[in-house]
Image: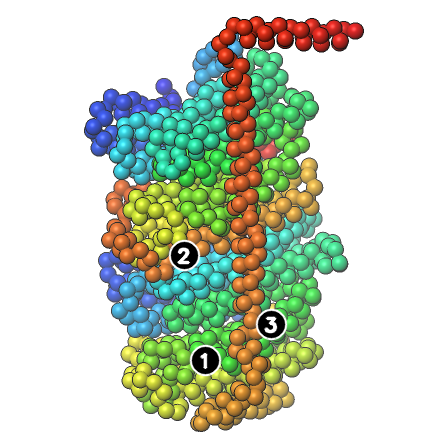
Amino acid sequence: MGILSWIVYIPFITAVFVVFTPAPKWYLIRWISTVGTGIHLILTAVLTWKYWQVASPDFSSMKTATLTKLYLVERFPWFESWGIDYYLGVDGISVSMIILTSIVIFTGVMASWHVKNRTKEFYVLLLVLVTGVFGVFVSFDIFLFFVFYELAVLPMYLLIGIWGTGPKEYSAMKLTIMLMAGSALILIGFLALYNGAGGQTFDLLELSKVDYPKSFQIWVFPLIFVGFGILGALYPFHTWSPDGHASAPTAVSMLHAGVLMKLGGYGALRMGIYVLPEGAKYWALFFMALTTINIIYGAFGAVMQKDLKYFTAYSSVSHCGFVLFGLVTLNLIGMKGAVIQMFSHGIMTALFFSLIGMVYGRTHTRIIDDMGGLAKIMPWFTTCFYVGGLASLGLPGLSGFVAESHVFLAGFFGNPWHDLGIMRFLTILATMSIVVTAVYVLRGLAKVFQGPIKNPEFAKLTDADITERISTGVLVFTMAAVGMLPWYLIDLIESSLMPFVNRLH
Amino acid sequence: MNEGFILSNAWLIPAIPLISFFLVGMFIRPASKQAAGLVATSAVFLSAACAYMLAWEYYQAFAPEYQSIVPWSIEWLRYQEFLSVSVGVLVDPTSILLMVVVTTVSSLVHLYSIGYMHGEEGYGRYFTYLNLFTFSMLGLVVAPNIMQMFVCWELVGASSFLLIGYYYDKPSAVSASKKAFIVTRFADLGFLLGILILGYFGYHVYGVLSDSSTSVLAEMNQYSSTAIQPFDFKFLNHPAVIAQFADQGSLLGGISMLTLAMVLIFAGAAGKSAMFPLHIWLPDAMEGPTPVSALIHAATMVVAGVYLVARLFPVYAASGSALLIVAYIGAFTCLFAAVIGCTQDDIKRVLAFSTLSQLGYMMLSLGVATMAHPLGYTASLFHLFTHAFFKALLFLGAGSVIHAVHSNEIWDMGGLKRKMPVTHITFLIATIAIAGIPPFAGFFSKDEILAAALGNHHQIIFGIGLLVAGLTPFYMFRIYFVTFWGPHRTEGAEHAHESPPVMLLPLAILAVLAVIAGFVPMASFVHIGEPLGHHGINWAIAIPAILVALTGIGVAWFLYAGNQDRVSKLVQNLGVVYRVIKDKFYIDEVYLFITHNFIFKYISRPIAWFDRNVVDGSMNLTGWATRMSGWILSHMQTGQVQTYAAWYALSTIVVFGLLAVTLQ
């Protein structure tokens, strides 16, 4: 087994260990999970280093490449007669997403330290889910990709339905059905790609070499883009997200908003724009308009929310809009901005949901108006929330700015195929969100943390304990590191994005 | 070129407060509050020492050409090839001037705060924020490109937000901090769009130049440690680049792209420097601790807008209409704020409006300058320099008074002359300095501004400047007389004590600076464009200005020095006019109306409703429709063979019927 298989299966192996641990020993279960994800984090560092070793000599030659170059490939036939392979590999984008996921699952496990209800099943499902996520990021056979994709999406139903809060069955059902509808579109799209290429192979790189006729691309691209877009909270298919996030337990919200929504952007980039460049060019302006709505609408939607989780969920809709917006600018700056935004938003939103979970565990309310003055009682949470909030409104020095400045610049620079005036108009609309974001973030923070202590019972509450400090600290650190030293992330992804751009020309 | 140690390591100046910020924030503050204050303060003093060294080394090494050099920079954000942002340090006379001002005032404010904030619960947090601010401001000042400027611009905004909201359990402070951030953010939207336009055209011009005239780029690369980039000030300000910009065509109504970009950038500058109509956040920002007001909202951060316009001055000059907007907005703010300042009762708010008015002076002075007659440029920075000292002194003096009396209202004070002698003398010096009486600092810089306005034939602006030169002494001596003269009006004033030496020392140092800063021969250090000819005090302008100022003082003395009956009579006679001015022309109310009615009531709430009911409703409807059809179809599964047979027969007939029809 190569390193990529280990990356995929370590969470699964951890899950197996958990399965064989007696359920009453819940403390052991969470330790096993922590160790497993901790090992995974280390392995991810090794992977990054290894990738850098093998890929960095090619960085300059990638400038003109039109085909993704894969590294650390593992490949053997799976269903030979249908041309399905077990085919793993990575490029810079995959590596950056693996880093993101590994950090989020590690902190997510730590943030779930206090899950007492069916601990064992919870961790098993969580770990299986994340196995699927890792699988998606390294699969370059679209059949395998789809298998992992479903593996990542399905456990969510149980995780929300059993461990959730509020109208959890409704939310879980809605989320699952909407995402399944997306999967159906994707499946049709994949089968079309497979058949259009002669039904010989599911190899993504082979498929991308096929010269699909333009009319074919024009009808397949929206299937794939919208299919993934549903997961990426594309307007108007984003409505699963506020309910789903609000009902989900902490770690699930973290993982879902932090990582799973990124599968949408990742899939749209890898399967949509990469394989069907002509289709992308045809539809880009339309989707750009939709994602502009996402950005503005999500931000305004967040302004009046009363529940902290809905608040964060709408803010996610707005921020995920930047991912898809960046992608459909179809230039290097925009795609880079999109990938950075995936990373940045993943960390940021994981931080938000973990903090909300921790604060909720103490106050037993998520209603913004019921809180107030928490800064005095919980300085650690307050600091983390502020850093997250400032990142979310795009403060330079934190990760959000790096991504957003890319996306704005990209929209303004435009591309050769679309009317520059319209693109700029949409970009200007999108930039307005920086003000609205400031409004809702500061409003929310002020109401929750500042002012006098609203409920005298809160005065007895405690600040973060050690596991909470580690998990939030890691996330804050990552956000600041990306914001202050963005060149590492940029170097990691930039050369891998070149083929995406070059193919369009 | 003989570079000294500090010159080649100029990054130290912003880096020292940054390192101190991390150290104090993460390690020292939890351990010991006192140590936090001391470390933070000494770091800024160290940084100040470096700034002075830098100034000395630079003027030694680069006289008399005063090149702008970038001794240190690294690539920070690469958007794509030939479009990246570096982080670096730009050293030229203008940035040195600002570095000196910022580090001096900041170190004195740090020192003062040790006394002022003594015993506060958030003492360590306060110094952490103060360090963060100092770093961000220095980063802004030394920015070699417009993106670094924007980055630090946002960071100073954030640290200002944190410091205004320092008393976070006080609702008024919380809402003031929010207001400051959101209003400046709104202005920054303009700044950002301006940067996008400049970045786009800069990138294209860069391409053109690298094809056609590489010598121009080579010239720009001189004295720079990384290759020139489209965002660099050096690039944007280069005549060859500006000439290319000017050809970029115009929009509807004949506004050129260049003018549009510069006006948008000015919107950002106006937000930060609190120009009308974006000034509303500054008076409220006085909710922060007083030393913060002295540092951020008087001496340093609020002049960032002036500095930004000065940095891009050649580009502004190329677009005459953008510069004219700068001039008139500046002049209007200058007058508008001075008028409001005459009616306020909170000592810090009076000082805040006075800051607005003085910032207006700086802006109008930049606005009247041209590349051919650039006296206004020098005058503006000169005024920035002198104003920093006397306004910081005024705020710190006010802080000392507030500390003693425990109130901000001037009518709660009175008779502090004898109780607080040092505070009194230093406050008086600063008041005279801002009033423009020679030989104190304010006189020289204001004289130069007026001379610049008249010299470039801006009679209206000159008139406004002269009028405000009379209003300024009036409102300043108004608060001076009410605070320090007359009887003790309250218990607090009765029991006032002089502040501790750690607070008085900065006052004394600033007082000395407020006296002597005017004698700095600014024109030989900082200038742009054509060399300035002879310049000194222009007595034809200075004498009327002094007379106007003396009149202002006289009126203030007449109304406020003794009996208050005259004031109340005057207020009664003015009636509605007085009310409107005192309520600041109801600008805040207009804003409140717009935000509450439009953003909250007519946009956000409907969107939230629309999302839950229409968008999500349609998703739920789909679900419901699916369930319903399932339910209806389930009725067909009756389990009775007869029914199935009937359906079978019926369907067969229909199918055959259809076939028969179609086949015919």
- In the image, residue A27 above or below residue B433: above
- Camera-side mark, 2 or 3: 2
- Subunit under mark 2: A
Q: CA distance from mark 2 to mark 3?
A: 33 Å
Q: Quadrant of the C terminus of chain A?
A: top right
Q: Earlier in the sequence, mark 3 or mark 1?
A: 3
* Residue that label 1 marks: B345
Query: Which residue does the image show at 53% across and 59% down from the upper left?
Result: B596
Q: Residue furthest right?
A: B664
Q: Amino acid at mark 1?
A: Asp
Residue A185's x, y, as percent? 56, 24
Q: Are the residues at dot 3 and dot 1 in contact (C-beta closer than 8 Å)? A: no
Would residue B588 be found to the left or right of residue B210 on screen? Answer: left
Vertical order, B512 against B92 (above or below): below
Which residue has dot 3 on it? B330
Coordinates of residue A306 in the picture (x, y in percent): 43, 49
The residue sitting at 60% across, 60% down in the picture is B265
